[in-house]
Image (tube, helix red, strand yellow):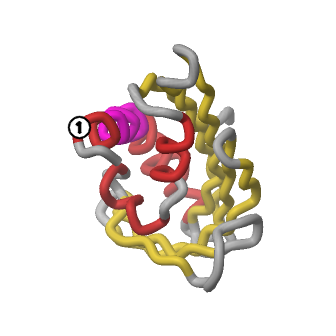
Amino acid sequence: MSAIKETVDVDCRPEDVYDYVTDTERMPEWQLSAVSAERLDPGPVGVGTRVRVTRHIGSRVLPMTMEVTEYDPPHSWGMRGVDGPVRARVHGEVEPFDEGRRSHVTIAVDFEGHGMGKVLVPLVVRPQVRKELPRNEQLLKDRLEHAGG
């Protein structure tokens, strides 16, 4: 199956958008299924940084560990799940336009199921994310444009 991909334009500089979307503790502010998120490693964020994210998936609340696989400020980032029954692969891009005053944000998400996740991914996770991702991007836009990031 192909990745679920959504794009939104945000009236903020790419640097501000990138800083916000890669700030782990802010994930629950703009991702509807995220209950909590915390960094597991000290120091600056970079490739290899691990994050513990707890999400609502259907009627379940599941913790999962994500690892940063790509970190290229302010252009792109990537993460992948390293444990749990549902392992996401996320790729995000921030492209400047309007002379760098605005940003074109694209987020693509795909999944790999392990154990019960093999059933959850097609029946619950993918349909949930198809509905949620456009709403998440709208929340991201609203937070950045109206709350000052």
Q: Quadrant of residue 5?
A: top right
Q: Is residue 55 above or below residue 123?
A: below
Q: Is residue 30 above or below residue 6?
A: below
Query: Is residue 102 or residue 109 the one in the foreground?
Result: 102
- Residue with the most extreme top position: 98
- Number of marks: 1
Q: Quadrant of residue 146?
A: top left
Residue located at (61% from left, 85% from top): 42
Amino acid type, label 1: His
Query: Is residue 124 or residue 145 the one in the foreground?
Result: 145
Q: Is residue 114 left or right of residue 10?
A: right
**Which quarter of the rendered picture does the N terminus lie within?**
top right
The chief SS type of the magenta part is helix
Residue located at (59% from left, 25% from top): 96
Q: Position of residue 93 (x, y in %)?
A: 63, 36
Q: Is residue 28 above or below residue 8?
A: below
Q: Which residue is mark 1?
A: 146
Q: Is residue 12 above or below residue 140?
A: above
Label 1 sits on a secondary structure element that is helix
Q: Is residue 41 left or right of residue 140?
A: right
Residue located at (64% from left, 43% from top): 74
First to last magenta residue range? 131-141
Query: Is residue 31 or residue 62 the one in the foreground?
Result: 31
122 magenta-colored: no
Q: Position of residue 94 (x, y in %)?
A: 60, 34
Residue located at (65% from left, 68% from top): 45
